[in-house]
């Protein structure tokens, strides 16, 4: 038993040292001031020789370290450090001008309301320096519409052929789970859609409860009604995948929770959601960032799968050795 205690203590010490190492190495990436410094720090965790998977597998050998790597990837993405900038890309301010012009057209056509405070962004003092060609802009100024769902729960029906009623529990991390919903009669749903109607490529964000900030993109055309606990974002000309990963980044998640009101349960008010500060890259770079994030996230998933198999094999061998010792 004393030997077991020493083994356990050694394992805990090794885990603590490993966690500190991972935190320090990942921290150097986000804190890099120049491209050369970033490249130097990147090579500390991703050897230039051999596969990236092998390099990562030797360092990110626990679930928590792989999760930390995922968060760092998202943060690097919205800091402009994940892919190189191309000076030939149209700068973000031109994209933002087109968004503004289009919104003015939609206002004149009576399709959306005029923004109350077009220049407002949240917590300007916390913003970091962006690469050349990027711009800080509020979420509302990047979107055709940012609103929430019905404040009073609409009339419901047991008829499962009617329209699903989507609440915070249905918005999962990266997907919509409509396996457990209430339903709203079609006529009631049509009235609700006068306020807002989720459509394909819209973003749904949880705005009430412990999972506030969790989000998903509407991947398909599905009729649904949302309630107050879900915020609807309709991007305008912005790459929806980029906007979603920006909202998932540690910087934006921290900003979201800083703006949350802690009443009976956490609540992110609509005015705060609309004012969230979004780092906007050139449109072409948005696509490159999304592709790189997808590539690295797939690598992280492979690391987790590899870790699960390794742990299962390790546990099987340990059990077999113990059983053999007991029966010897």
Image (cartoon, rainbow, N blue to C red):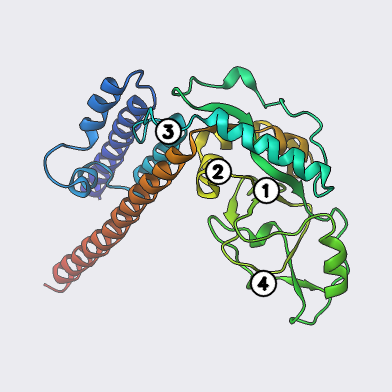
Query: Between marks 4 and 3, how big is the CA–CA gap?
Result: 45 Å
Residue with the mark numbered 2:
243
* Image marks 1 and 2: residues in contact by CB distance under 8 Å: yes
Label 4 secondary element: loop
Horizontal side of 2 relative to 234 (left or right) equals left
Q: Is residue 84 left or right of residue 97?
A: left
Q: What x and y, as percent, mark residue 300?
A: 33, 50
First along the sequence among labels 3 and 2: 3
Q: SS class of the residue under badge 1?
A: strand
Badge 1: residue crowd in 10 Å (few <14, some 14–19, many ≥20): many
Could you tell me if the residues under marks 1 and 3 are in contact, i.e. CB atoms within 8 Å? no
> Dot 1 corresponds to which residue?
233
Eye-nearest disc, 4 or 3: 3
Residue at the spot 34% in from the left edge and 28% down from the top edge: 29
Tell me which corner region of the image, top left, top right, bottom left or bottom right, holds residue 100.
top right
Q: Which residue is mark 3?
A: 89
Q: Position of residue 176 (x, y in %)?
A: 60, 63
Work out whether 135 lies above or below 144: above
Q: Tell me where residue 301 appears, x and y as whole percent.
A: 35, 55
> Can you say whether 233 is above or below 310 in the image?
above
- Which x, y percent locates residue 1? 25, 51
């Amino acid at each position: 038993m004393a030997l077991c205690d020493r083994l356990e203590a050694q394992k805990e010490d090794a885990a603590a040292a490993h966690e500190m190492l991972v935190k320090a190495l990942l921290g150097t990436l986000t804190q890099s001031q120049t491209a050369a410094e970033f490249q130097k720090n990147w090579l500390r965790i991703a050897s230039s020789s051999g596969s990236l998977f092998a390099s990562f597998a030797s360092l990110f050998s626990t679930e928590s370290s792989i999760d930390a790597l995922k968060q760092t990837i998202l943060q690097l993405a919205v800091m402009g450090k994940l892919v190189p900038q191309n000076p030939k890309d149209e700068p973000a301010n031109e994209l933002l001008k087109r968004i503004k012009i289009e919104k003015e057209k939609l206002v004149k056509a009576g399709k959306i309301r005029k923004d109350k405070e077009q220049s407002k962004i949240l917590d300007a003092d916390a913003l970091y320096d962006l690469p050349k060609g990027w711009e800080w802009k509020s979420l509302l100024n990047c979107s055709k519409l940012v609103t929430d769902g019905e404040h009073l729960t609409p009339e419901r029906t047991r008829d499962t052929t009617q329209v699903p009623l989507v609440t915070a529990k249905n918005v999962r991390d990266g997907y919509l789970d409509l396996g457990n919903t209430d339903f709203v009669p079609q006529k009631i749903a049509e009235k609700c859609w006068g306020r807002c109607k989720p459509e394909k490529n819209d973003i749904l964000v949880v705005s009430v409860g412990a999972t506030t900030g969790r989000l998903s993109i509407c991947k398909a055309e599905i009729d649904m009604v949302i309630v107050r606990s879900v915020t609807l974002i309709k991007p305008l000309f912005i790459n929806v995948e980029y906007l979603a990963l920006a909202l998932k980044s540690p910087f934006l998640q921290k900003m979201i929770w800083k703006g949350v009101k802690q009443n009976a349960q956490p609540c992110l008010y609509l005015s705060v959601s609309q004012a969230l500060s979004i780092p906007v890259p050139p449109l072409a770079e948005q696509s490159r960032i999304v592709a790189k994030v997808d590539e690295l996230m797939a690598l992280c998933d492979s690391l987790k799968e590899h870790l699960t198999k390794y742990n299962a094999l390790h546990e099987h061998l340990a059990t077999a050795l113990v059983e053999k010792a007991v029966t010897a």
